[in-house]
Amino acid sequence: MAIGEPDRPLRVAIGEDDVLLREGIARILADAGVEVVSQSGDADDLLRRTLAYRPDVMITDVQMPPDRDDDGLRAAMELRRREPGIGVLILSQFCEPAYVMQLVGERPEGIGYLLKERVGDVAAFVDAVTRVAAGGSALDPEVVARMLGRRPQGDPLRQLSARELATLAAMAEGKSNLGIAQALLLSQASVEKHVTAIFRKLRIAPADTEHRRVRAVLTYLRADDRRR
Amino acid sequence: MSGDERATQVVEVATAELDGLRALAEERAALLRVAELVAQDGSPAEVFATVVTEASRLLRGQAMTLSRFEGAGELVVVASCYGPAPVGDRVVFEAGTLPDRVLRRAAVVRVDDYAGERDAALARSYGLGAAVSAPVTVSDAVWGMLTATSASQPLPPGTEDRLAQFAQLIAVAVGNSQARTELTTLADEQAALRRIAELSARGMSADDVLRAVAVEGSRLSGVDFTTVLRFEPDGSTEIVAIDGAPAGVVVGMRASAAGDGAVQQLWRTGRAARVDDLAGVAGRWPQIAHRAAFTASVAAPILLQGALWGALVVVSRDHPLRRGIEDLLVRFADQVGIAISAVDARLRLRALADEQAALLRVAELVARGAAADEVFVAISDEASALLGELPVALMLYDDAGAVVVATCNCPAPVGLHVPFSAGTAIDRMYRTGKPAHMDTYDDTPLADVTREVGITSTTAVPIIVEGRVRAALVSSNVAATTRTAVEARLAQFAELAAVAIANAETQAKLTASRARVVATADETRRRLQRDVHDGAQQRLVHAVIALKMARNTVEVDSAASGFVEEALTNVERASSELRDIVHGILPRSLTHGGLRIGLESLVGGVTLPVDVRVTTPPRLPTAVETTAYFIVAESLTNAVKHSRARSVSVSVDLEGDTLVIEIRDDGVGGADATRGTGLTGLLDRVDAANGSLTIISAPGEGTAVHAELPVDIPGDQRAPADALQGW
């Protein structure tokens, strides 16, 4: 199932202090053929185990013991600093673009941020884990919508048509052109046309691979942050 | 007798008669020349010079001197022809001497041999052997005398008559000129008084009127330096007006009652006084005048309602002031008193008004709730200005002593800590709660400190708050004479300082209690957020996940499927709503990411385009971040709900140690800030942060919310309210 190494199953470490949810996630992933190498109820334990087992993806909650603050997020950032090759998928009850931006830093590769309830959409959830493991991105649509928000006058995003905005949001989520076409009920050709228009209007250098497209969008949003 | 003999006799007789006639003619001619001169209103000096010359010639070149009596025992030489003493020479004479006899008898006196006279030694020093003097009598008073002298021989008989005739002419000339001078003086005096009266009537300032008095004083007495001085109850004086002052002598200068100058004599006797030679005369004023090359002075009393108010002092540069000028000055000063009484009333009124105005300014500051340290500075400044730029310091007591917190014209630096030590004003006042004075710091532990900063004496009043001596208003180097007045004025300022301190403490307590309320509320929010996160929100997430899983296990289009879908929709909506509610309670982006990120996240959820500009450092104190966030959040909510704005701009800047927050929309404006906006609910929070919040919302011009929050940057000076805590 794992991309790139078909003969080896995808390996994940899970950090979640809510035992029921943790077990549920583990079962969903196991049923999908993902190997859950460790389960932790606090962030320190999660980081230790992740560094020891070196899974493909670390899945973690944000608010966790020991401090019950942003411990999970801090563990994720520490992991990215020490092991940039291991993907991080945040499962959170907060719809906070700030967390996403902070986690992304200058590098959107291998990052996911989903609201916890997305776990119930098993196929989409497993797909997100797989994308993150492969160095792609998986951002929650609700978070992306908040990031793209209402833009002030003079903001280049206001030049985009409704279709183009929807396409941009889907791109930011980490979807491929095919995925976008399916989600928006468009032909792939239309999607490609929108993508080209977006890059032109936002003055972003065109890019082919999927995670570079996410990077382009996030880079744009970050630069926008700084500009404001 | 032969014919020749007879003829010789006739010739002799005739010759003698002719000589006599000739002499008589000469005498008549001389007298006529003088008389003509007098008739032509020749100046006295000219008449005097002519008289002595003619008289001397008539007496065959005999030495001739005209002198004027000054007071009871003195003569001044006013004209001389071959005389033993030069013009201007003064001769003091004793009783029984020739001048004394002339003066008392008003008759011609002859001395044929000075050897037997009382003033033989004096006469010898002048080279005199004999003399004849005739009195010059003007208006029934002996004005002077005309004297013929010889070195040895007695003067010839007949000298008396001749001198007497010339003396009469002199008397006429003097009488004429004196009358004229008196008339002129009177006219001058009246003109001077009229000018002063006009100034008073025109409502000129006191300074102008007093200065006019000084100018007229100079003009009347023909000097270049005149001052008007006011007496304090102890006899010390202050210059209130001045004309032709030497460099460095200014209005406001003071001198003690000590010394022998004309002013001090006047203070002691109540009468006009003079000093003819200022050299070596004790007292500040004589010394100042002498240093500036003045030689003589006369002071005349200025009375106000019968009491001595001050002195008019004329100072002359190169000669003693003429006799009798006292009378002129006394008359002038008398009239001036009337003008001054009006001015004095105005002065007092103005002083009172100044005092009230100064107190009012400070009181307004206190009432406005200005920071205590601002009030302290104002009190020092106003008190010092009111007390003629005396040094003033405000000191706060602590456990060990008192520290200077505000000064004006004071040598002691702000921050100077004066420890308690027995006997000092600071110490006594702390224990007694009463005003205290220190005449000297010698022999106290503070001798060195005070000497270093130039403090010789102290007049201080306590500042008492709720029965405790908390601070002191201190003035240094106050003249002993003005101490009571200074103390009374300081006391008034001390009362205001006490109110300011009490206000500041009440305010500090209020602010602290509000801050506690806000902090408690913030903590409650955090706990609530966490509880919801770990409780209801988590269970809803479970429910969503479970229902989604269930959806996969039931048959599509079955009845169960419908129920599951409906349940899922409801639960997802509940979860989403709860997420928004939790976000509203205290957004994670704010607590985690700081104000900028919190606001970014906030505007992401607003249905209006919002331009956010945050230039602050990434993190600020939590309370400030939270307050700023809620101000923006509430303003945005209002803009969305009420303003019909097309866009909103938000700016947050740190200016010095103040966080400036501004939210502007382009909507309809006209928001009533007093009700209906959730912003008023934030006022407690803003007050607790010692901040301010204003809403400007003119109809049709959009709404602008402007808030300022002080940011207590670590390492910065403590806020004034804090500084007041704990002492």
Image (cartoon, grey):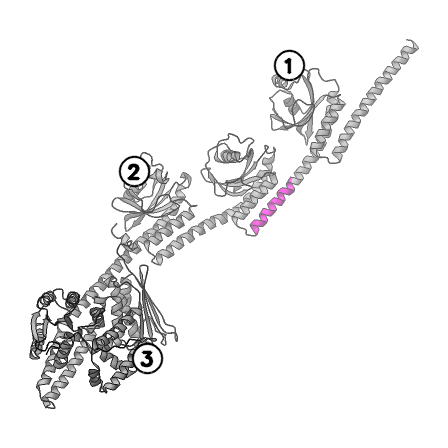
> Which residue is pictured at 57% across the width and 49% down the height?
B199
Q: Which residue is mark 3?
A: A159
Dividing the image into 4 quarters, which one contains the N terminus of chain B? top right
Query: Where in the figure is residue B712, as x and y percent of width and height?
Result: 27, 58
Q: A211 or B42: which is nearer to us?
A: A211
Q: Which residue is mark 1?
A: B115
What is the magenta range? B185-203
Residue B572 placement, left or right of B248: left
Q: Residue furthest right?
A: B3
Image quarter of residue B337? top right
- Chain bearing mark 2: B
Depth check, mark 1 against mark 3: the one in front is 3
Q: Residues within 10 Å of mark 1 (few under 14, many from 20)?
A: some
Q: B492 or B26: which is nearer to us?
A: B26
Q: B169 or B76: which is nearer to us?
A: B76
**Distance (Cα) linking label 1 and label 3:** 133 Å
Image quarter of residue B439? top left
- Chain bearing mark 1: B
Q: Which residue is mark 2?
A: B423
Q: Mark 3 belongs to which amino acid? A: Gln
> Which residue is pictured at 14% across the width and 79% down the height?
A127
SS category of the residue bearing label 1 = helix
SS category of the residue bearing label 3 = helix
Q: Is residue B249 magenta?
A: no
Marks 3 & 2 on one chain: no
Residue B339 placement, left or right of B428: right
